[in-house]
Amino acid sequence: MKTIGVLGAGIMGNGIAQVSAIAGYDIILYDIDQKFIDHG
């Protein structure tokens, strides 16, 4: 497993994506509102 998908780019989703990226995984970050993805 090299890619992690995170559904929801709020505070918790951003944290999960950030920790996973630091650990070396490729991240797919998805949210229904583009402004949250841009922030993440």
Image (spheres, rainbow, N blue to C red):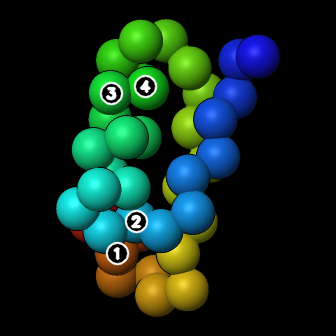
Residue 4, located in which quarter of the rendered image? top right
> Residue 27: horizontal and vertical position, in percent?
57, 38
> Residue 19: horizontal and vertical position, in percent?
32, 27
Check disc 2 and report its element: helix, strand or loop. Answer: loop
Mark in front: 3 vs 4: 3
Residue 11's label in the rendered image is none
Of the image marks 4 and 2, the number of the one nearer the N terminus: 2
Q: CA distance from mark 1 to mark 4?
A: 17 Å
Q: Is residue 40 visible?
A: yes
Check disc 1 and report its element: helix, strand or loop. Answer: helix
The residue under label 2 is 9
Of the image marks 2 and 1, the number of the one nearer the N terminus: 2
The residue under label 3 is 19
Q: CA distance from mark 2 to mark 1?
A: 6 Å
Check disc 4 and report its element: helix, strand or loop. Answer: helix
Q: Are marks 2 and 1 in contact (CB under 8 Å)?
A: yes
Of the image marks 1 and 4, the number of the one nearer the N terminus: 4
Quadrant into which the N terminus falls: top right
The vertical placement of 12 against 22, above or below, is: below
Tag 1: amino acid: Phe
Residue 21's label in the rendered image is 4
The residue under label 1 is 36
The vertical placement of 23 against 35, above or below, is: above
Disc 4 residue crowd, few under 14, some 14–19, many 20+, Cα 10 Å = some
Q: CA distance from mark 3 to mark 4?
A: 5 Å
Check disc 3 and report its element: helix, strand or loop. Answer: helix
Q: Are marks 3 and 2 in contact (CB under 8 Å)?
A: no
Q: How many marks?
A: 4
Tell me what residue is drawn at x 34 percent, y 75 percent: 36
Is 6 placed left or right of 23 in the picture?
Answer: right
Q: CA distance from mark 4 to mark 2?
A: 14 Å
The vertical placement of 35 against 20, above or below, is: below
